[in-house]
Image (cartoon, rainbow, N blue to C red):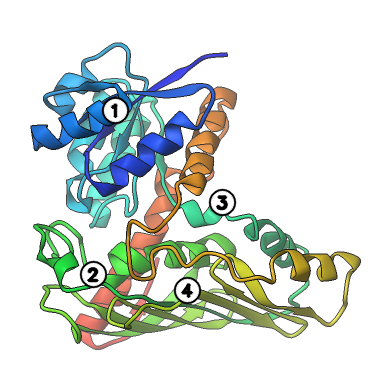
Amino acid sequence: MKTWNFGIIGAGLIADFHARAINDIPNAAVIGCCDKIQERAEKLADKYGVRAFESYEQMLASDEIDIVTIATPSGFHMEPTVAAAAAGKHVICEKPLEITLERIDAMIAAHEKSGTRLGGIFPYRFNDGMKPLREAIESGRFGKITYAGIYVPWWRTDEYYKDSWHGTWKLDGGGALMNQSIHMVDMLCDVMEPIESLQAYTATLGHQMEAEDAAVAVLRYSNGALGVIYGTTASYPGQFRRFELTGTRGTVIQVENSFTVWQFSEEKAEDAEIRQKYGQIEGGGGVADPAAITHENHTRNFKAFLEALESSEDFWISGPEARKAVEVILAIYKSAKEQKRVVLG
């Protein structure tokens, strides 16, 4: 079995999650990292016993590296991703893929040209409860789906926004939506029909920052269903994220990774088991502390990427797939700024 050697570009908080996740995969290993602040790269390298490269260019020149993960601030994702494609390296990139569609499209085009793979990171897709939810949707158990909405009432301190990039348009690409709520926006992109149009408001209410710390959007999906996106980092002390899906024959409410409602007009034998298995609320990581998440779903995300490479099949969260959530969020920003309905696509 081939061992896939990873290099990590960026050595901040999320890079540590990447390192732990990769090292949990039997046929994968982190062998190097880099950061524009060399001391930070050396600290991460010392922790995992790997090489601290002086730059991502030096890392990409190494024949030992097969794949790089991108763990830099969001507005710095494009340059190393495009350079990696030119160097023949596969890339798996932290969310959001980038902060503009133009920059994302350049990343996708670079890897299509080189024949390498570009994948996104959306760990929520790998929660255990997502499997029965997808199966219920695909089998038509909801009947005519009439509504799907997400709620991310989180909290971040003022200190969180005092660093060099969080909550800035240049490097974060936005605020509560682009950084925190994007995971749940991706969930809608994953399980629902495309969003056809939306009307939105954003505001900066609880922090001194450039971008929004509160946002709400009303949605219309291509199948006629309606929905809501609500995301904030100004909801002390931070509450559980929530997903609601309802139709003419069923309703599911997911809180964190659990189901508080799992009810259909036609009961099946497995429903009681699902309610029992996923009825206890588990999770809460990230509601107030970005470090309070586990790396297990990152491991699943990276493992799925390796399986796609080994099988030559399409990766579930390809570049175009990871692009969808950013498109929705940018449409929300556009609607809020122009105070009008925005049609997607």
Residue 195's spot in the image, x, y percent?
A: 47, 72
The residue wearing badge 4 is 241
Q: Secondary structure at mark 3?
A: helix
Q: Is residue 268 left or right of residue 158?
A: right
Q: Residue furthest right?
A: 269
- Of the image marks 1 and 3, the number of the one nearer the N terminus: 1
Q: Nearer the viewer, residue 181 or 313?
A: 181
- Of the image marks 2 and 1, the number of the one nearer the N terminus: 1
Q: At label 4, which amino acid type do we have? A: Arg
User: Crowding near pointer 1: few (<14 within 10 Å), some, many (20+)?
Assistant: many
The quadrant the C terminus occupies is bottom left
Alpha carbon separation for disc pair 3 and 4: 16 Å
Alpha carbon separation for disc pair 4 and 2: 17 Å
Alpha carbon separation for disc pair 4 and 1: 36 Å
Residue name at image x 50 percent, y 57 percent: 124
Asked if the residue at tag 1 contacts the one at tag 4, i.e. Cβ–Cβ closer than 8 Å, the answer is: no
User: Crowding near pointer 2: few (<14 within 10 Å), some, many (20+)?
Assistant: many
Splitting the image into 4 quarters, where does residue 172 fall?
bottom left
Residue 38's spot in the image, x, y percent?
A: 9, 32
Residue name at image x 13 percent, y 65 percent: 168
The residue wearing badge 3 is 126
Splitting the image into 4 quarters, where does residue 110 fall?
top left
The residue wearing badge 1 is 85
In this rendering, the answer to whether 232 lies above or below 71 is: below
Q: Nearer the viewer, mark 4 or mark 1?
A: 4
Q: Secondary structure at mark 1?
A: helix
